[in-house]
Image: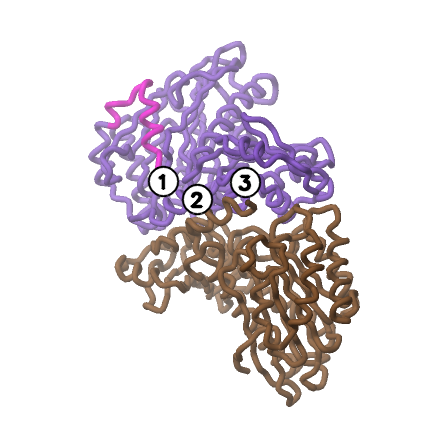
Chain colours: A brown, B purple
Amino acid sequence: MKLINGGVCAAKGFKANGIHCGIRKNHSKKDLALIVSDIPATAAAVYTQNLVKGAPLTVTKEHISNGVAQAVICNSGNANTCNANGIEIAEAMSALVEQYTGVAAKDVVVASTGVIGQPLDITPIKSGMAELAAGLSAENGGAAAQAIMTTDTTAKEVAVEFIAGGKTCRMGGIAKGSGMIHPNMATMLVFITTDAAISREMLQKALSHDITNTFNMLSIDGDTSTNDMVTVLANGLAGNPEITGEGDDFTSFMQALNTITVQLCRMIAGDGEGATKLLECIATGADNEETAKIAAKSVICSSLLKAAMFGADANWGRVLCAIGYSGADVDVNKIGVSFRSAKGTVEVCRNGAGVPFSEEVAKEILLENEIEILICLGDGPFGARAWGCDLTYDYVKINGDYRT
Amino acid sequence: MKLINGGVCAAKGFKANGIHCGIRKNHSKKDLALIVSDIPATAAAVYTQNLVKGAPLTVTKEHISNGVAQAVICNSGNANTCNANGIEIAEAMSALVEQYTGVAAKDVVVASTGVIGQPLDITPIKSGMAELAAGLSAENGGAAAQAIMTTDTTAKEVAVEFIAGGKTCRMGGIAKGSGMIHPNMATMLVFITTDAAISREMLQKALSHDITNTFNMLSIDGDTSTNDMVTVLANGLAGNPEITGEGDDFTSFMQALNTITVQLCRMIAGDGEGATKLLECIATGADNEETAKIAAKSVICSSLLKAAMFGADANWGRVLCAIGYSGADVDVNKIGVSFRSAKGTVEVCRNGAGVPFSEEVAKEILLENEIEILICLGDGPFGARAWGCDLTYDYVKINGDYRT
């Protein structure tokens, strides 16, 4: 398996586009994305666990209840959530896809992201559809990645090539993240496409398993959006024998998917609202996987630690503290903590107590923009990773006045 | 019952003092507090639920295991936590209290607050004890309140007078709060004194019940300290018949305690690290108390909502969102949301959807420094309150470089 250029159009038979249709006031920001497969594809999805769910999620669930989808339409700038006519608007978006591409409305994944509780006007979408559909091309995946951004500062796309059943398959994805992302709920918006042939059951199994170690281990601010979803469309055009059960091909597929999702996690965390640093907490030495996950997530979610990382302050007491209140069943007297970056590694705590270290060295390490927080629990062979970002002035600025 | 001036010396037979002994580098900041009762008092306490517990908590638990205490010593500037010799230092602090006041070391409550994982030097405490003890007086409760502050910007004290068994009783308390305060754990540092006579069992019962509606409903940043405790000392000098069971006197005692703790909660939340606003979420219409509590706490803990309040932005979608991911069993289509302050009330959401409102009026209401977020769940007669603060640039600033 290898990383290749591209995103949702890396796999055979997918075209995409993204335009500014007018949902956003800023004309330089694209706000409408479309992804279309040449043929109907096997589809799987996971959704937010928030009880408040955007209307697009309800419509998408219904549309892919038969395990088939052929297109994705997604707008940014408005979440189409908590509006009286949300379902109607999401259905209207699907109907427009049918009208302009021929893909049946019932095979359309619909997604929206942006402010909650303001009616989404269908007018700009309607008037933009001709341009959006006309520009569909295997070269325009990047435009789609741009059009789903909200407070993201960079478009997020990644693609890989892998072998299944002797055939070269490809898989790619795009994501929008930034704020309101928290573990243990589905995730943010992620659209993944592949030309591998895989059964509906195995596709959903792969996705549902993968997110427990990837998007569910990602937190920007502890809030969980109402509109999160991850969808995978697999159109089978790579020509591999359909993956219908466990085995080498499924393993290859899972590895490809995990590569895509880990990369997107890192991109989302590093581009968290206002973030200056990507934080990765690597827990080892747990006596079971769940304990490792709970501890790693708690560390990555601590506002105090996140602020300390912004200040490049090796305040390891906050790491211990976060493990201590996480609910993980650990012996605090066995915990070790180190910080690592491209500048090196500094051990700061062993057996639950501080060890002497150079503040200058620690500062140099923590001034890097990718920081690993290594926690060893000293209890067994299990580990976990979690991703997050620092808490900065700009997070407050961005979220202090998001709507206006 | 009425509010009166004072804090831990409002009740008969309590003296206190606070000085700068040298734990902190800044000479203008007091760092050592002492509270002494003329006679041994009945004692009750609650502690942090963090697995990482400061050494002072271990020593205090042991000291009041017989339900008796006569003094409180507390330093700020160093948490005496995650140090190899923490227990030894906490015991040494107790011994110093015995040496300088005659109160038995085993009757001393010991507390520390400040940075974790740096050894606490006993030297400045030892050299300050003579001055600290010499200044003990019923007039110096305020100095004690100052000496326990860390990033607090104001000292926090409150006192009340109430009647029990025909006698006038008094109760007062001091608190230090600011950062690292999160519901469902014990709390921050709070020391309460009263001259009411009450049995050990009823005192613990009163405290353990009270905190479920007060300090456990308070969050500054979602982090939970390693050193939190609340203690109550009741010396019985008011002369009321000892409260040994339920009844009018116990009810009066509970009301007095609740008045103290709610006031301290509001003071702590309003003085949260970097806070410009006190936020109070008032949930009503729940079909049980737990649901109301879960919803109110989730709202008050949402970083996104806290940042919106800082920006005086009536972004009610974030309120709904926080209720939606709280885990509370609610029907989102019944939820109503209003914002209220001294400038008035604005309804922003009814039955889970937005209602038209004036952004200008909402802004005027939200620019106040005490904001109530009213959520009605539309399901029953139960309610709950939770307290927090906005998320500001200064929170990040304070916590980005706390140690150095």
Query: Is B146 covered by the magenta stretch?
Result: yes
Give the distance between the C-alpha atoms of the residues marked 1 and 3, in whole angstroms: 35 Å
Q: Are marks 2 and 1 in contact (CB under 8 Å)?
A: yes
Residue B217 left/right relative to A350: right
Say which quarter of the image contains residue B290.
Answer: top right
Query: Is A54 covered by the magenta stretch?
Result: no
Q: Earlier in the sequence, mark 1 or mark 3?
A: 1
Magenta span: B132-151
Q: Position of residue A155 (x, y in %)?
A: 53, 65
Q: Earlier in the sequence, mark 2 or mark 1?
A: 1
The label number, if any, that marks residue B225 in the structure image: 2
Residue, disc 1: B113
Q: Secondary structure at mark 2?
A: loop
Q: Is residue B279 visible?
A: yes
- Say what amino acid the circle numbered 3 marks: Asp
Q: Position of residue B343 (x, y in %)?
A: 55, 26
| Chain ID at mark 3 | B
Q: Residues within 10 Å of mark 1 (few under 14, many from 20)?
A: many
Residue, disc 3: B313
